[in-house]
Image (cartoon, rainbow, N blue to C red):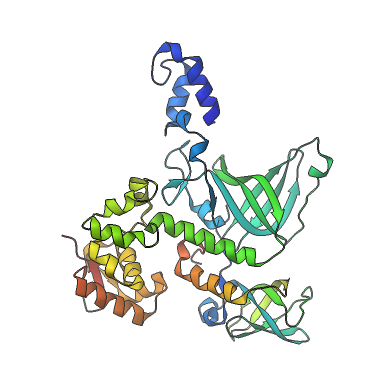
Amino acid sequence: MAQYGGYQRTGYGAQGGEDGGGFIGGSQQGSQGGGGGSKGYSDDSLRPVTIKQLVDCEEAYPGADLSIDGIPITQVTVVGQVRAVNPQATNITYRLDDGTAIMDVKKWVDAEKADDTNPQFGLDTYVRVWGRLKSFNGKKHIGAHFMRAIDDFNEVSYHMLEATYVHLYFTKGVPGQQQQQGGAGGGDGMFVDGGHGGGGNNAMQAGGAVNGPARLAQCSRNAQTMFNFLNNSPGGNEGIHLNLIASQTGLSVRDVISAADELLGQGIVYTTMDDETWAILDY
Amino acid sequence: MEATSTPRITCAYLNSYVGKNVMVVGKVMQLRGDEAVIDADGNITAHLNRDSHLAAGSGVQLIGKVNPDLSVKVLSSMDLGTGVDFNLANTVVEIAHQHKSIFTYDQ
């Protein structure tokens, strides 16, 4: 798409307008948004993801880039088990399950290569897929560039951890960097965001970013988890009860209580209805 | 596409998943007919199905339903051989529970 757009712009460049003015082609390109024409390979990345992340990600408006954690995705890699194989004339559709969700993977067939037309992977085999997430008629699938079987099960574990690492990298920033920047920048949440890939606004929309006070950086991880949960939950002034925080964050009740003590001590949260309900202190 | 997940769990999480489908990676400790004991950060009793071909001492991935007595009724099993890093698999379970937003749907 990007290459096509770029070509058009060159062709009609004499017309002067930024987006090609009245030409149908030009205006279509304009509506693609996000500066589709100027996007090059330099923006491409290969991101490890879970299938649930792909299922959950939505385009902001039709035709917009699909993004996860506020970062547009280009190439992705997933690992999962083949649950169904459906050979068709032009492609082989594999139904891939990685335990987090299920999604179809289409591997297009090269008719010239005889062995391409036969399914390569049997049921229940673990495979790694490299490809792009495609959205067609509101239904998403992965268009696979390449697939291979996984011999060593540890690669599955490794992939899940890597996907988590990248998710945390985009939502919480580079490990270790947060504290330094928090100290230097006087606690400006945006400043922390700016540090990784310029995803500032996007990261905020993703709702995972730590935009807390600078003092939060000195708190334990449990306290930061609790703050993030409070920050991302609706309900505002009423606060959120201990039990709900514990069940939603996966922390134990004791951990939540000590995290709350820590946050109270820093003046980041306050108790509302009772001693076990907290809300973020905004000022 | 399909918003159903099979959460990865270890022995310690059985309690929270009674009646649900889960995925367990562990080491086969004992085989007794159609029953097996799997070590996944603690021993889990698994009721095998006809298609299960397990080997004692090797790694296995079970997908099954957690019974009220905290045993697992196996729906599908896969032998993983002997090269499985069980600490790594258990770590994945912990991480998956810390970051549910990218791993599991609430069921």
Q: Please indicate, yes or no, whether residue A272 appears anywhere in the rendered image.
A: no
- For the point 21% across and 74% down, the residue is A264
- For the point 43% across and 52% down, the residue is A69
Residue A36 vertical position relative to residue A170 in the rendered view, above or below: above
- The residue most toward the right is A114
Q: Quadrant of residue A254?
A: bottom left
Q: Quadrant of residue A132?
A: top right
Q: Horizontal and vertical percent for residue A117?
A: 80, 43
Residue A146 vertical position relative to residue A230 in the rendered view, above or below: above
Residue placed most toward the observer, B95 or B2: B95
Count of residue discs: 0
Residue placed most toward the observer, A155 or A233: A155
- Does residue A224 appear left or right of residue B91 in this picture? left
Q: Horizontal and vertical percent for residue A131?
A: 61, 46
- Does residue A154 appear left or right of residue A33 in this picture? right
Residue placed most toward the observer, A99 or A43: A43
Q: Horizontal and vertical percent for residue B89?
A: 59, 72
- For the point 45% across and 38% down, the residue is A64
- The residue most toward the top is A14
Residue A160 vertical position relative to residue A256 in the rendered view, above or below: above
Residue B90 vertical position relative to residue A48 in the rendered view, above or below: below
Q: Please indicate, yes or no, whether residue A35 appears anywhere in the rendered image.
A: yes
Q: Horizontal and vertical percent for residue A61?
A: 43, 39
